[in-house]
């Protein structure tokens, strides 16, 4: 395994060079923002069987893209036979978040809570925690945390987790914000899928995330509501059961997978969110709170302070060779298994 990139530019260059060497077709789109003109959504495509497509997504939550990018670079180094499913890598779906060490994008939108057709479902419990998630001053960081734990205990952990993380449309400066329109990053992904995967009869999407769950632990999340046979697929393909998020007993609003399904209504889609755990939930939330606090108050065009970068990287991409090695191995393993499953389908 190569060393992980420490910044967005380095991750992107490494990915593009690996795609070039592997003979993948590259497609790039600018995602403009006043903080940087050098933000790109990059796609690398190996066109083989157009009826079967394997898709890999990194950096839906920007900062998580450092690990996802390392997985993709590793996989591009595999030897690719002439026959097999078409392969599509999406590098840094949220390039702004990667460049500026954020989970949300440059509009403070969570790209895995953004896609929806109608109005958002109300989530009144979020407001109970906004003062904690988006504190008015850094001095109240610790006392806000105790108050939030107290509220969560009274509400019940499951309901509190749903209130905090299932998506909210009422606090544009808060966390897990859904946005008021579908974001450009999602539209670009939909355009690419429409143009390059329109013939797909079967498509498997692996969406690589980090930060939730125990250190180095893998969780595989599927859409039980949209895919009734998801459990069988995961068992047969990966040799284990999918995870039912124990304390996340809700369906998040505005999922990216819904955007993929809507784009390719004729395609049989398996969507698996691979989540690799790192720090504790409270520690991770602390990193997100600090980052969000600083971001809303940043001087225009400034770099992120060292303590913000350090806290976010530690929460989502710990600088521990054994964590990084395990995460890349797990990401690559699931991809190879999914590719074998697609290749083995009867024609
Ligand atoms: Zn994520």
Image (cartoon, rainbow, N blue to C red):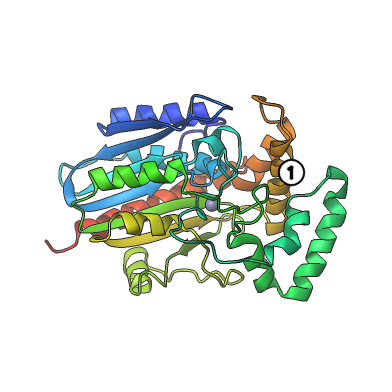
From the viewer's perspective, is 242 left or right of 148?
left
Name the residue furthest front. 119
Residue at the image point whose x is 49% and y is 40% from the top: 94
In the visual, does 127 lie left or right of 83?
A: right
Is residue 79 visible in the rendered image? The answer is no
Residue 175 visible, this angle: yes
State the image coordinates of residue 260 (x, y, percent, origin top left): 35, 55
Q: Determine which residue is flagged by label 1.
A: 290
Quarter holding the N terminus? top left
- Between 249 and 330, the residue placed more toward the observer is 249
Look at 42% across and 46% down and name the residue there: 186
Q: Is residue 269 left or right of residue 167?
A: left
The answer to whether 94 is drawn above or below residue 340 in the figure is above
Please report the residue visible at 84 percent of the width from the left and 62 percent of the height from the top. 147
Residue 198 left/right relative to 169: left
Q: Secondary structure at mark 1?
A: helix
Name the one closer to the observer, 343 or 28.
Answer: 28
Point 32% across, 64% down: residue: 237
Residue 151, position as x, y percentages in the image: 79, 68
Residue 2 position in % (x across, y down): 47, 34
**Dividing the picture into quarters, in which one does residue 14 lie?**
top left
Q: In front here: 192 or 153?
A: 192
Quadrant of the rendering where the C terminus is positioned: bottom left
In front here: 296 or 279? 296
Picture quadrant where residue 146 is located: bottom right
Question: Picture coordinates of residue 115 (x, y %)?
Answer: 46, 54
């Amino acid at each position: 395994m190569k060393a992980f990139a420490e910044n967005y530019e380095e991750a992107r260059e490494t990915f593009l060079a690996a795609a070039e060497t592997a003979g993948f077709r590259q497609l790039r789109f600018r995602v403009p923002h006043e903080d940087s003109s050098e933000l790109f959504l990059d796609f690398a495509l190996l066109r083989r069987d157009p009826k079967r497509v394997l898709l890999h997504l990194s950096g839906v939550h920007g900062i998580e893209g450092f690990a996802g990018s390392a997985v993709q670079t590793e996989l591009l180094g595999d030897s690719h036979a002439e026959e097999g499913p078409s392969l599509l890598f999406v590098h840094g779906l949220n390039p702004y978040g990667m460049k500026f060490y954020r989970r949300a994008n440059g509009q403070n939108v969570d790209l895995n809570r953004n896609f929806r057709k109608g109005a958002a479902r109300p989530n009144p419990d979020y407001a109970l925690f906004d003062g904690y998630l988006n504190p008015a001053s850094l001095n109240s960081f610790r006392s806000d945390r105790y108050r939030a734990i107290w509220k969560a205990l009274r509400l019940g952990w499951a309901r509190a987790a749903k209130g905090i993380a299932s998506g909210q449309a009422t606090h544009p400066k808060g966390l897990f914000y859904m946005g008021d329109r579908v974001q450009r990053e999602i539209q670009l992904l939909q355009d690419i899928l429409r143009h390059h995967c329109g013939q797909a009869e079967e498509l498997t999407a692996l969406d690589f995330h980090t930060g939730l769950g125990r250190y180095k632990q893998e969780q595989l999340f599927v859409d039980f509501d949209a895919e009734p046979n998801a459990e069988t697929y995961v068992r047969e393909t990966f040799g284990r059961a999918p995870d039912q998020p124990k304390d996340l007993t809700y369906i998040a609003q505005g999922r990216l997978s819904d955007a993929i399904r809507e784009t390719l209504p004729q395609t049989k889609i398996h969507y698996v969110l691979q989540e690799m755990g790192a720090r504790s939930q409270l520690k991770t939330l602390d990193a997100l709170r600090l980052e969000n606090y600083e971001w809303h108050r940043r001087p225009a065009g400034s770099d992120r302070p060292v303590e913000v970068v350090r806290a976010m990287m530690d929460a989502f991409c710990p600088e521990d060779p054994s964590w990084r090695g395990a995460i890349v191995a797990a990401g690559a393993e699931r991809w190879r298994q999914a590719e074998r499953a697609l290749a083995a389908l009867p024609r």
